[in-house]
Amino acid sequence: MKRFFLVTAFFISQFAFSQLVVTDVGATSQLAQQVSTSVKSLTQLQKTYEMMEKANKKIQQVNGFVQQANHFRNIINKQKQAINSANELVKLSRKRKINLSGVTQNLQMISGSIKTVQALLQNGVFNMNDSERLERLDAEYNKVSQYESNIKTKLIQTSFR
């Protein structure tokens, strides 16, 4: 009977294609270590992403400040040109009789625009984003440019009289 069971078991084992569960302690610990390393990597990557996101926001803010500074410089240059033209008109008015009231008004308007621009450039005065602030700076630049050209026109007109 033993022999019968042994022979039967032998023949059945030939047709049984099953595998035994094998646990490898080394592979399991290595897998756990890889998962732990991956979690640490992911955490570090997330911190790096957050840092880059903050840096990007600061760079955008700096770019906005640079553009605003360029607009401010252009407005200041226009104001300087207007003052130089007004000084020339004052020199001409000593030689000729010239009405300077329009020039005074234009200079006052330029001064008001400069104050508005200074208020715009201070953060927190107006709740504006960079594009709105740049549009407002463009509008002020156009005003200052118009006032400066009015003074220059007056200078040219009086120079040829």
Image (cartoon, rainbow, N blue to C red):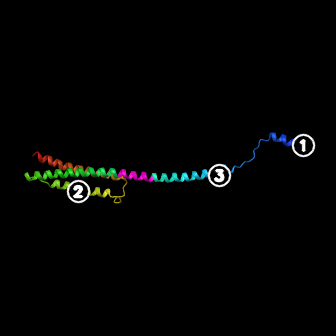
| Separation of residues labelled 2 and 1 (CA atoms) | 115 Å
For the residue pair 145 and 71, the one nearer the viewer reads as 71
Mark found first going from the N terminus, 2 or 3:
3
Q: Residue at x 36, y 51 (%)?
A: 64
Residue 97 among magenta residues? no
Residue type of the residue flagged with mark 2: Ser
Residue under circle 3?
29
Q: Are marks 1 and 3 in contact (CB under 8 Å)?
A: no
Disc 3 secondary structure class:
helix
Residue under circle 1?
4
Residue under circle 2?
111
Mark found first going from the N terminus, 2 or 1:
1
Instruction: Indicate whether 10 appears above or below 68.
Output: above
Horizontal and vertical percent position of residue 105: 19, 55
Horizontal and vertical percent position of residue 2: 90, 45
For the residue pair 104 and 123, the one nearer the viewer reads as 123
Q: Residue at x 17, y 48 (%)?
A: 152
Residue type of the residue flagged with mark 1: Phe
Q: For mark 3, does the 10 Å Cα neighbourhood hold few (<14), some (14 to 19), or many (20 or more) residues?
A: few
Q: Residue furthest right?
A: 1
- Residue 96 showing in the rendered view: no
